[in-house]
Image (tube, coloured by chain):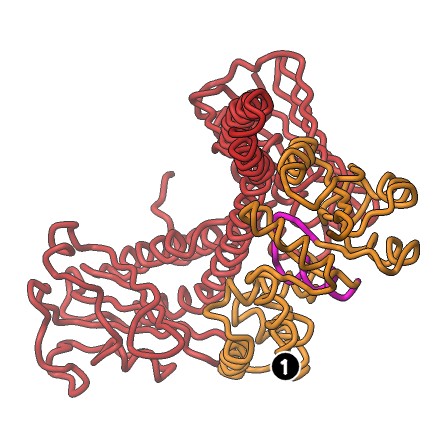
Chain colours: A orange, B red
Amino acid sequence: MSDPVRVMIVDDHPVVRRGLRAFLETQPGMTVVGEAGDGQETLRVVATSEPHVILLDLHLPDGSGSELIPKIRQWNPAIKVLVLTGFAGRHEVVPAIQAGADGYLLKDTDPDQLADAIRELADGRTVYAQEAAAALSAYVSGGDPRESLASLTTREREVLAGLGQGWSNARLATELFVSEKTIKTHVSAVLRKLGLNDRTQAALFAVKSGLVES
Amino acid sequence: MQSTPSTAEVILAAITEAVGSGRSLKETLSGLAETAKQISNASYAAIGIPEPEGDAFSAFIHVGMSDELVAEMGPLPRTHGMLDAMLHDPEPVRLTDITRDPRFRGWWPRAHPLMRSFLGVPIVSQGEVIGAFYLTDKIGGPEFTQEDEANIGLLASHAAAAIDAAAIFEDSRTLALAEERERMARELHDALNQSLFSLSLTARAASRHLGTDPERAAEELNEIALLAKEAMAELRAVVEGLRTPDVDRDGLLAAIRSQAALLSRVHHLDVDVEANEEPTLDGRVEHEVFRIVQEALTNAVRHAQPARVTVSLVSGDSLQLTVRDDGLGFDPDEQNYRGRRLGLTSMRERAASIGGTLTISSSPGNGATVRLEVPG
């Protein structure tokens, strides 16, 4: 039989660490070799506990989990990182994958599937929750705000920025020195290109994509 | 000698009230329709704002009809016939008998009052018709006069600005609400996710231990009970924190504290509340003061990116309220802060309505302070 998979848990919630440890210790061929509650501690524990797989929460008190991934790899490029976190929006998923995460699961995963995923990673495969895969494919196919913005003309981007500030068509027309009819055409084009339903969605999109400060 | 206000004065008052008072679009339109009816002696008055496309009105506000009659008539009209004609031509239309005009489509909807004399005046904003005034059945005369037409024309020329202002205010409100809702949902999910995930893991661990290590299984079952209790406490705390503050139920100070706690939670910043004692004010005054605090906090959170906001309430002979943020600040004289200006105007109006005075001091880079003083 092969050596047990050495697992390390990184999460700032003690209840989550305790639950993970209690469950993983019931798994044959798996051992929990370390725990950490923040980024600093993670780098210290990684150096001494020699994990094969790290379960990594993205929301840590001293920064984002994604930023830790390259630092972990620097220590030992063979360590597999399984992100285990609460959300799978593109702002979480994309940076994590870009930083080199080998897996991405949500904190509502069935425990047995989590155990299977850890084994998959230890064997060199990747595992992504459906939600994470969806966010990633939306990003790759141009669904990311910054990517979609590229499909807009300069004028349409100005209109979107105005919508983000809650401007009416009349206000937009004044600010951009065109008629309201022209603005309406631009607004329709923006909604169509971004696949949005209404002005409120457009405004939220503008804020989220960093076009305007929230 | 007491004289009745002239038509010009009525128009001026209506416009002053309608522009920049932080009212909703509906309130603004209904104020304008009421004024139009009054100055032209019409039996019925309406303002219609069409949707950008299609044949529906996004708003059709009318005055002069009883609620029963409105209910009997059914759905709001669409942009057909004479209603539609007014939306294409910036010229007013004045008729003795609307039913004889070729643009009349020949019949009234069920229960609709029969109307004869008609005055329609388009509302034009930057060369485009954005809506129209519809006035019918002149009281005390067979038709609307040249003077009526001129007066409504004057009202319409100012109405465009009032409608724009109200629409901007409403847009920014909707956006703020949508953002707030999203933050709350995330907050609630995050708070419960931790203990429920742990609970699910621990339950699986307990069932694994049952056959081989009953003692360990019992230990995990105890942990499950604890986790469930914790999750309930968290749920209660979050729901309590997200509950809309209520001045009548909780008192002014508690309502302010609860609003502050809500904002700190969803926006991740410090909102401190300092007070020397529970203020004793008239209920209506407390409501207005609370609204001012809400508005001031919302402005700070939305526009200033502060790290800390402090609300201070000093009660004594008078009530002194201060809302201070350490955010970006702004130049209060600058015209570019229209969305925020509407908020400021509405705070000033609320202050004035309870005999208080409100001052705002700020400069770029130095945060902002809103001060309210209400005599006791």
| Residue A57 drawn above or below residue A73 | above
| Amino acid of disc 1 | Leu
A68 up-or-down from B195: above or below = below
Residue furthest to the bottom? B102
Q: Give residue A128's position: percent from left, percent from top.
A: 62, 62
Q: Is residue A85 magenta?
A: yes
Q: In x, y percent, where is residue A210?
A: 70, 64
Apparent side of residue A68 relative to residue B165 in the rendered image (left or right):
right
Q: Secondary structure at mark 1?
A: loop
- Asked where in the image residue B100 lies, by quadrant, the reply is bottom left
| Residue B195 horizontal side relative to residue B81, left or right | right
Q: Residues within 10 Å of mark 1 (few under 14, many from 20)?
A: some
User: Residue B348: image x %, image y %?
Assistant: 58, 39
Q: Which residue is mark 1?
A: A152
**Taking B182 as reference, is B320 left or right?**
right
The residues colored magenta run: A83-99
Residue at x-position 65% and y-position 84%: A153
Q: The disc numbered 1 marks a residue on which chain?
A: A
